[in-house]
Image: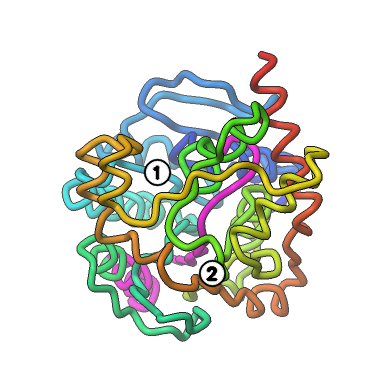
Amino acid sequence: MNQSHELHVIFGTGPVGISLAEELLTRGKRARLVNRSGKGEIPTGAELVAGDASRLDIAQELSRGVAVIYNATHAPYEQWPEILPRLQENMIESAAAAGAKLVMIDTLYLYGETHGQPMTEATPYAATSRKGRLRAELAWGYLQAHRTGKVRVTIGRAADFFGPRVLNSSLGQYVFPAALSGRPALTLGNIDLPHSYSYMPDIAKGLAVLGEREEALGREWHLPVPPIITTREVLQHIGKELGLGQLPQVFTVSTIEQARAANVFDETFAGEYEELFYQYTEPQIVDSSTIEQAFGLQATPWEEALRNTIRWYQERNRS
């Protein structure tokens, strides 16, 4: 098949899905985005269709004739046990019926607390959280579908997101708008610990490469992360890019109880996120050297990534 005109379908139109569509278009692919409403802003040249990926017949219909399926769907935490296994089954069955590759975007939750040890693709699944254990079961299921020959699968795993279009993140809507307006940026946990972050365009590029390369199949990969620094150092970079000459003001929430008391999160989200808050009370160090060495990928330097992120937030404020 001529890869330059392949049709790729992306289920999910959050920041991952939209950024991935942009990346695929730059590579000469045709990109079909799918969400429930069929509405939303998409890159010029991409296709957007309405479809409920939780229905197998619809997922299969929208996947016919595609070369690669990307699962970039998302659901509220409280709905994960019900929705994510169903989406997994539908993605696998749709890819198998279409003869397509399946690329999955994943989190770090399945590793659990690592006590500062760098996370590699060989790090064992040792989650103590319900969401981490569910993610481990799903990852095993995707790779088992590959091992049995049912479908060709690969998994790209990312750290906390930041970058254009990223709002719902610890380095998102609570940080950049505040820094731009001179208000205190909200931070979580201990900001003097090393903490890996994934820049959204790097995530998109990594997923696109995983969809292209046969040697990526049947494996888990850590998507490229920039050099690991502390969150305080990230904020210092932001202050420098904004010409502040100093660290932006910071309001730190050290525990989930403080987040509740300050009404940072609604009670439903706080209850679900409590078991994951360890990510901000111990170092979160992701080693992405495997994918970098295998495919020549490099994360965008911090200065460039933050400059682009700030520019996106500034444009968003003007619109």
Q: Is residue 161 magenta?
A: yes
Q: Is residue 4 visible?
A: no
- For this rendering, which residue is in front, 223 or 111? 111
Q: Is residue 165 magenta?
A: yes
| Residue 195 locus on image (x, y percent) | 55, 66
Q: Nearer the viewer, mark 2 or mark 1?
A: 2
Identify the residue at the far top of this view: 319
Which quadrant of the figure has residue 250?
top right
The C terminus - image quarter? top right
Q: Is residue 303 above or below residue 227?
A: above
The residue labelled by disc 1 is 73
- For this rendering, which residue is in front, 202 or 255? 255
| Residue 299 locus on image (x, y percent) | 72, 62
Q: Is residue 276 above or below residue 16?
A: below
Q: Name the disc covering residue 193, or none.
A: 2
Q: Which residues are magenta?
A: 138-166
Q: Earlier in the sequence, mark 2 or mark 1?
A: 1
Q: Residues within 10 Å of mark 2 (few under 14, many from 20)?
A: many
Q: Is residue 134 visible?
A: yes
SS state under label 2: loop
Q: Residues within 10 Å of mark 1 (few under 14, many from 20)?
A: many
Please name the amino acid that badge 1 sits on: Thr
- For this rendering, which residue is in front, 98 or 165? 165
